């Protein structure tokens, strides 16, 4: 008898492991999913979920937990937070079996006569790292609290969602509200596709501002903070955000959304320093003192512009190989240098035009972009085109050798690439055309009046075709040369066409210092000695084949001496300056791998901090591009 039971169990498990998951089809889904989330357990940071899913027919059915998150371009949704899954039909429990090949898939045998499945489970929110909940704040990405039936495009699956908030919380989202009763918010029916593109932010301390008063398509700034003081946005900054709400629709020549909501957290508890794009909203996470000390956060000044631009470049128009009918179909990112690279370019330029950064600060930011790109020695083996595969295997994984391994360089290097395209368009049309003409024609022209949430896909050929209509050229060959290059021969062409060159001096710019603090949390000597150094003299990174690398300094070494002195950051800087004059190697002592040692580093080129310098006799083509708002595009 025991052998018979084991054989049956083995057969069931084997069947689940080998069963093909239903392929998504673009067909109607009958009925609507009802989703109820209780977010009131702030102590344990647990989201409690109830979900009902209409049964289409009895028999075999597969429920999917989302894995591929749209804004990360990769399979970044972790499954470990899903717990306590119970499935019932007609009040009676129905057993589920996890797929042996895809753990995000749950096989269910739906009993005859069942009209709907009743699901109950919890999402266990992280208490460290990517925190979603605090005592005073909540961010809710719907994909973490919902399953959906396999076999349909998720744009065809209707959903009616509701959310129970902690007492005293207000909320913001691009979802449209149906009703509010006490702490329970009910949203109007939408599709599963649109639901996961419309997160909810909520909190105890909330401020809202209309950025486009009187506009047919409202644009709202929703700020949620750790405390009331964090939300004290300076009136001048608010005016710049209102100018942004005018400038981007003007640039892209459309307002494809019904309304747009900035979801802005100002917090040192929830993660700060990043953003997520959606079509009718964006998530922007700022440090607690962002508005009380705006001049201390220059590297983040263009984040809100970047995420807003993604509503057009990335969400309304999306690369064909990044689009998927579900959240469990693998995607590719071969055009991320368009999706992210050009968006990053517009973030840089519009931040200057809107006064979020000064013209000089923008030039200094471009110098850092250029210096970082030049330092990517990994270009010798890994092209810019290949970095578009990075989201498929690098997300969340520690990377020790940033310059050699490369990661997602289509952001910063994309700025330089699209700067060159802009300058080349101006050059070839006598200054009459620019990248703004491409942005309007490609990402938005004719969009007004269309279905606000319809995504239109594009290919590499479409990009080249639109550019050719603006200025005939071998654009396919142009991009192929630069995307597949293993040298930096064309890397700084855009700066040169603009009338600038990259130089290094021994004095850091204000932007470099802030970027150094934001990205390193210590001292950045990557373009001189070839190291970045964190707290207590610990070496965080070593430049591949740089001076420190060749001398035998490794990642994780703790610096102890500089010459005859105890180690300090300032002592090392002075030693580098002195070596440039005396031509004597730098003596550096450190502890590593359980022993102490001293090395001599023959580096004599002083400190090197990036700046842009005007090219003599060349017109300044950045002057017009960086001119204050209204944009002189």
Image (cartoon, grey):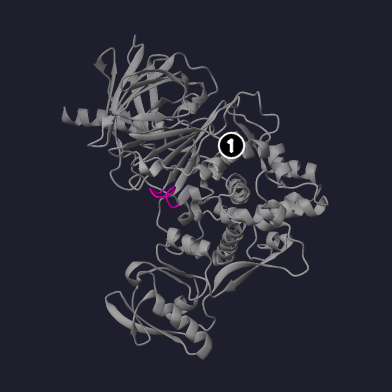
The prevailing secondary structure element of the residues shown in magenta is: loop
- Corner quadrant of residue 255: top right
Q: Position of residue 31 (x, y in %)?
A: 44, 13
Image position of 606 with respect to 88: above or below: below
Q: Position of residue 318 (x, y in %)?
A: 60, 37
Residue 623 on the magenta segment: no
Q: Position of residue 533 (x, y in %)?
A: 40, 69
Q: Residue at the far front: name it.
A: 235
Marker count (numbered): 1
Tell me where the magenta segment starts and ends, as one range. Answer: 287-293
State the residue at coordinates (65%, 61%).
485
Is the residue marked by circle 1 packed among few (<14), some (14-19), or many (20+) residues within 10 Å?
many
Q: Residue at the far left: name it.
A: 1
Residue tagged 1: 245
State the residue at coordinates (32%, 14%).
111
Q: In the figure, is residue 116 to the left or right of 511?
A: left
**Position of the N terminus by quadrant:** top left
């Amino acid at each position: 008898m025991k052998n018979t039971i084991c054989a049956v169990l083995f057969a069931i498990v084997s069947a689940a492991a080998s069963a093909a998951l239903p392929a998504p089809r673009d067909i109607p889904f009958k009925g609507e999913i009802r989703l109820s989330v209780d977010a009131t357990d702030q102590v344990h940071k647990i989201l409690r979920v109830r979900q009902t899913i209409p049964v289409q027919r009895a028999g075999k059915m597969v429920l999917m937990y989302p894995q591929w998150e749209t804004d990360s371009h990769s399979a970044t949704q972790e499954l470990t937070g899903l717990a306590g899954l119970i499935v019932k039909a007609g009040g009676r429990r129905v057993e589920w079996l996890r797929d042996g090949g895809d753990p995000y898939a749950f096989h269910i045998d739906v009993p005859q006569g069942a009209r709907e499945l009743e699901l109950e489970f919890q999402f266990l929110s992280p208490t460290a790292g990517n925190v979603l909940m605090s005592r005073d704040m909540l961010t809710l990405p719907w994909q973490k609290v919902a399953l959906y039936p396999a076999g349909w495009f998720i744009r065809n699956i209707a959903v009616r969602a509701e959310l129970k908030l902690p007492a005293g919380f207000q909320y913001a989202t691009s979802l449209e509200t149906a009703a509010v009763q006490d702490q329970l918010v009910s949203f109007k029916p939408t599709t599963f596709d649109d639901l996961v593109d419309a997160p909810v932010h909520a909190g105890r301390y909330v401020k809202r501002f209309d950025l486009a008063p009187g506009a047919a398509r409202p644009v709202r700034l929703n700020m949620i903070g750790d405390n009331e003081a964090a939300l004290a946005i300076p009136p001048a900054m608010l005016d710049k955000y209102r100018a942004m709400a005018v400038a981007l629709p003007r640039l892209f020549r459309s307002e494809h959304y019904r309304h747009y909501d900035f979801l802005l957290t100002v917090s040192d508890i929830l993660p700060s320093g990043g953003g997520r794009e959606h079509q009718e909203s964006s998530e922007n996470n700022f440090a607690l003192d962002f508005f009380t000390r705006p001049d201390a956060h220059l590297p983040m000044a263009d984040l809100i512009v970047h995420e807003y631009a993604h509503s057009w470049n990335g969400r309304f128009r999306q690369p064909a190989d990044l689009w998927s009918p579900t959240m469990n179909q693998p995607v590719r990112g071969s055009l991320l240098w368009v999706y992210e690279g050009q968006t990053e370019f517009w973030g840089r330029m519009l931040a200057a035009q809107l006064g979020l950064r000064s013209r000089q600060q923008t030039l200094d930011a471009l110098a850092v972009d250029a210096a970082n790109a030049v330092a990517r020695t990994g270009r010798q083996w890994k092209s810019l085109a290949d970095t578009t595969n990075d989201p498929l295997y690098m997300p969340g994984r520690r990377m020790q050798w940033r310059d050699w391994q490369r990661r997602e360089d289509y952001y910063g290097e994309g700025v330089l690439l699209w700067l060159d395209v802009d300058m080349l368009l101006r050059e070839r049309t006598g200054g009459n055309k620019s990248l703004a003409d491409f942005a309007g024609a490609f990402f938005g022209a004719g969009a007004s009046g269309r279905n606000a949430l319809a995504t239109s896909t594009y290919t590499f050929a479409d990009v080249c075709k639109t550019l050719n209509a603006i200025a005939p050229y071998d654009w396919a060959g142009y991009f192929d040369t630069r995307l597949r290059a293993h040298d930096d021969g064309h890397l700084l062409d855009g700066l040169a066409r603009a009338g600038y060159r990259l130089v290094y001096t021994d004095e850091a710019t204000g932007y470099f210092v802030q970027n150094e603090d934001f990205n390193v949390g210590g001292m950045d000597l990557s373009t001189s000695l070839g190291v970045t150094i964190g707290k207590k003299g610990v070496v965080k990174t070593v430049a591949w084949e740089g001076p420190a690398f060749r001398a035998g300094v490794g990642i994780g070494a703790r610096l102890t001496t500089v010459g005859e002195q105890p180690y300090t950051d300032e002592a090392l800087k002075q030693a580098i300056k002195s070596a440039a004059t005396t031509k004597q190697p730098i003596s550096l002592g450190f502890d590593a791998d359980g022993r102490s040692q001293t090395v001599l580093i023959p580096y004599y080129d002083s400190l090197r901090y990036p700046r842009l310098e005007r090219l003599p006799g060349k017109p300044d083509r950045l002057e017009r591009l960086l001119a204050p708002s209204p944009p002189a595009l």
